[in-house]
Amino acid sequence: MKSTVTSPDARGLSVPNLTLVSKTLDFVGALELLDNSVKLYQEVVQSYFQDIASLPSRMDELLRKRDLSEAVRALHTCKGASLTVGAKLLSELCRQYEVKLKALRQNSEPLDDSARQAMLKELESAVANTRHAITEVLGSMRSQNSSKAAPDINTRALVEDLISLRNLLARSDMRAMARHKAICALHTSATDKLQTLAPTLKVFDFAKAVVQCDELISDFSAPKQT
C-alpha cells in the first residue's frame, strides 16, 4: 500500500516505504544541485549505482590488507557522490567511518575483525536501502507523470511574470535569480522552457538572459494555432 510523502525529501510523491525513503534520501536537495533536471539526475544515478555496488567488497579488501589510507579515500569519494544524489544516509555513514579510520591510522591502531564485519554489514545495508529509495522515487515520478495530463499553462500570468523577470535582468539585478526560481515553481507546466534560462543565469550573463527572456515572452505571447 502506498503512502503520500509529506516531507520535502520526496517532493510530495506517492511512494511505497515512506519511512525508508524519507530517512535515506533527500531527493529535492539533490535535484537543486543539478538545476532541477530529473534527466540529469537519472544519468548521474546510473553511474552512482555502479560505484556503490562495489563499495562493501572494496572496503573488505582494503581493510583486510590494512590499507587504511585507501579505505579512507574510498569512503571520502562515496561520501561526495552520495551527497550529489541526495543519499544522505549513506553519505553520513561514510563520513562517520572516514573519521574513525583516520583516527585509527593516526594512532597506528588496527581495526579488529568484529569491527570490520560490523562496518561492512552496515555499509551493505545502507547501499541496498539507498538503491531501493532512489528507485522507488524515480519509479513513482514516472508513474505519476504518465498518468496525469499536463495542466494548461496560464500564459497571461506567465508572460507578466517573465516581463517582471526581464526588467530585473535588464538592470543586472541579482534578485533575478530568485525571481526565476519562483516563476519555475509557480508555472510548473512550462518548466522545461523556463529552465533554458538557468545555465545563463548561473554564469551571470544578464545580457544573454535578456535575449532569452524576450524569446520566451514572444513564444508564450504568440496565439495558439488551431
Image (spheres, rainbow, N blue to C red):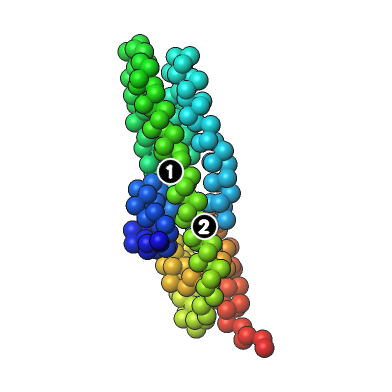
Give the amino acid type for the residue marked by disc 1 in the picture. Answer: Asn
As displayed, is residue 74 above or below residue 151? above
**33 vs 89, nearest the viewer:** 89
Q: Residues within 10 Å of mark 1 (few under 14, many from 20)?
A: many
Q: Residue, x 60% and y 73% (percent of image)?
A: 215
- Mark 1, secondary structure of its residue: helix
Please state if 101 lies on the left or on the right of 139 as rendered.
left
Q: CA distance from mark 1 to mark 2?
A: 15 Å
Whether residue 78 is visible: yes
Which x, y percent locates residue 155? 52, 81
As displayed, is residue 54 above or below residue 102? below
As displayed, is residue 174 above or below residue 34? below
Q: Which residue is mark 2?
A: 139
Please identify the residue farthest to the top as the structure is shown: 108
**89 vs 122, nearest the viewer:** 122
Q: Quadrant of the N terminus?
A: bottom left
Whether residue 206 is visible: no
Please state if 139 lies on the left or on the right of 25 as rendered.
right
Q: Quadrant of the C terminus?
A: bottom right
Which x, y percent locates residue 164? 45, 74
Residue 138: give its label: none
Q: Residue, x 46% and y 40% (percent of image)?
A: 128
Give the amino acid type for the residue marked by disc 2 in the picture. Answer: Gly
Q: Residues within 10 Å of mark 2 (few under 14, many from 20)?
A: few
Q: Which residue is mark 1?
A: 129
Q: Residue, x 49% and y 60% (percent of image)?
A: 140
Which x, y percent locates residue 216? 58, 73
**108 vs 49, nearest the viewer:** 49
Mark positioned earlier in the residue sequence (1 or 2): 1
